[in-house]
């Protein structure tokens, strides 16, 4: 049944539930690690989800200034996109402020405002997911030629960028990495945390554009796993598996091999390195184990697989990158 305008979406998945079902063996149930260190088997509807994770909150002048400051680091055409999206959200904020100032309270208006705050950003992510469906289906079927279509590549890179920036894992890492050595830095870090709902979308947009514009330089490859060790995924589905990524300090790496498992058998990678050739690559068991280990090390809580014994060997690595040393910078 279609939602009406007053229906607020409460349960916000920061990793797409439909994506996770590829580890469900034809069902919606997957094996995953819990916050308490157990391995559970349950529906994807109950994991990598927080209530109101993408809910819009009012932006102060300081928070808007922080957003615009980060935006100015981007190419001009992206800055214009950022401002356009930001203005749309601010129009809603100003309209609500005028309504509050009027002193009038109308139940239908209250419901509508709440639904807008809960749904607008969630719906933006859903639109990227919808456009990526045919690409992901083709890639899962080992048909890399789907990306010869320019529009498909644009939509997939936009989706890919947001798979990096939209997660709780990415948010918590970035916020924790902000310096808080004096009042100015504390104010900046707090403003960034409060404006994160917009910044995360803006960063995803930038990452997606960068990946698309650099597509002829980086190596885009499909990894095919025919070994007895399946690919796993996590609460941070895209991870950097380049050898330069530190396993002891959370610092900004100089290079990236961005790895995205699509199913227990198929993964996609965008490489700065020359480790894989463009196109189809069959990987051996040692490579699968290495990639799964790095997925676990860059997960915060959940690794996800199609069988319990697919994730159990990697459980000890969960969060390793974030636990060995203090955060330095992102």
Image (tube, grey):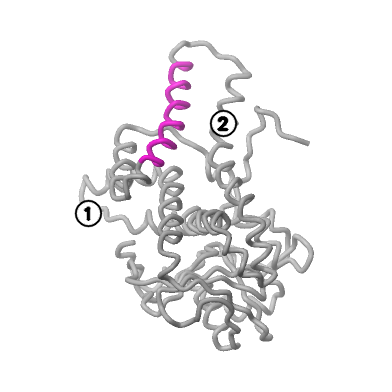
Dominant secondary structure (helix, strand or loop) of the stretch shown in magenta: helix
Q: Is residue 167 visible?
A: no
Magenta segment includes 220: no
* Camera-nearest residue between 62 and 83: 83
Tell me how many marks there are: 2
Q: Callout 2: 10 Å neighbours few (<14), some, many (20+)? A: many
Query: For mark 1, what is the residue?
Result: 181
Please identify the quarter of the rendering in which residue 53 is found.
top right
Q: Is residue 127 left or right of residue 21?
A: left
Q: Secondary structure at mark 1?
A: loop
Task: Name the one closer to the observer, 36 or 74.
Answer: 74
Is residue 89 magenta-colored?
yes
| SS at mark 2 in the image | helix
Residue 30 image-quadrant placement: bottom right
Q: Picture coordinates of residue 98 (x, y %)?
A: 44, 16
Residue at left 42%, top 29%? Answer: 90
Per the rendering, the mark at residue 116 is 2
Q: Position of residue 205 (x, y in %)?
A: 44, 50
For the C terminus, the image quarter is: bottom left
At 63% across and 45% down in the image, what residue appears?
11
What residue do we see at 44% from left, 61% from top?
211
Closer-to-camera residue (299/120)? 120
The image shows residue 123 at horizontal and vertical percentages of 59, 41
Identity of the residue furthest to the front in this view: 149
Range covered by the magenta-colored residues: 80-100
- Using the rendered image of the protein, determine whether residue 176 is visible from the camera's viewpoint: yes
**Residue plotted at (52% across, 39% down):** 55
Q: Quadrant of the N terminus?
A: top right
Left or right relative to 275: residue 312: right
Q: Residues within 10 Å of mark 1 (few under 14, many from 20)?
A: few
Left or right: residue 133 compared with residue 210:
right
């Amino acid at each position: 049944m279609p939602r009406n305008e007053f229906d607020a979406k409460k349960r916000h998945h920061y990793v797409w539930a439909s994506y996770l079902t590829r580890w469900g063996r034809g069902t919606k149930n997957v094996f995953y690690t819990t916050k308490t260190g157990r391995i559970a088997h349950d529906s994807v509807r109950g994991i990598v989800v927080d209530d109101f994770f993408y809910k819009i909150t009012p932006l102060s002048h300081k928070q808007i200034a922080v957003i615009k400051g980060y935006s100015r680091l981007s190419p001009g055409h992206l800055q214009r996109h950022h401002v356009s999206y930001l203005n749309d959200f601010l129009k809603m904020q100003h309209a609500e402020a005028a309504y509050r100032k009027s002193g009038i309270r109308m139940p239908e208006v209250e419901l509508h405002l709440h639904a807008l705050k809960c749904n607008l950003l969630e719906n933006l992510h859903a639109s990227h997911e919808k456009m990526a469906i045919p690409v992901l289906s083709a890639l899962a079927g080992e048909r890399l030629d789907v990306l010869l279509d320019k529009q498909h590549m644009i939509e997939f890179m936009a989706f890919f960028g947001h798979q990096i920036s939209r997660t709780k894992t990415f948010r918590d890492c970035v916020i924790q990495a902000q310096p808080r050595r004096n009042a100015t830095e504390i104010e900046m870090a707090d403003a960034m945390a409060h404006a994160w709902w917009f910044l995360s979308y803006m960063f995803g947009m930038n990452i997606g554009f960068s990946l698309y514009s650099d597509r002829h330089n980086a190596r885009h490859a499909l990894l095919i796993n025919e070994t007895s060790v399946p690919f796993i995924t996590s609460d941070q589905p895209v991870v950097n598996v380049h050898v330069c990524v530190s396993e002891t300090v959370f610092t900004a790496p100089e290079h990236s091999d961005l790895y995205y498992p699509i199913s227990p058998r198929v993964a996609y990678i965008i490489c700065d390195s020359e480790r894989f050739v463009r196109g189809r690559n069959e990987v051996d068991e040692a490579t699968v184990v290495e990639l799964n280990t790095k997925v676990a090390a860059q997960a915060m809580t959940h690794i996800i697989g199609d069988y319990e014994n697919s994730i159990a060997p990697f459980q000890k690595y969960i969060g390793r990158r974030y636990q060995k040393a203090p955060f330095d910078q992102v």
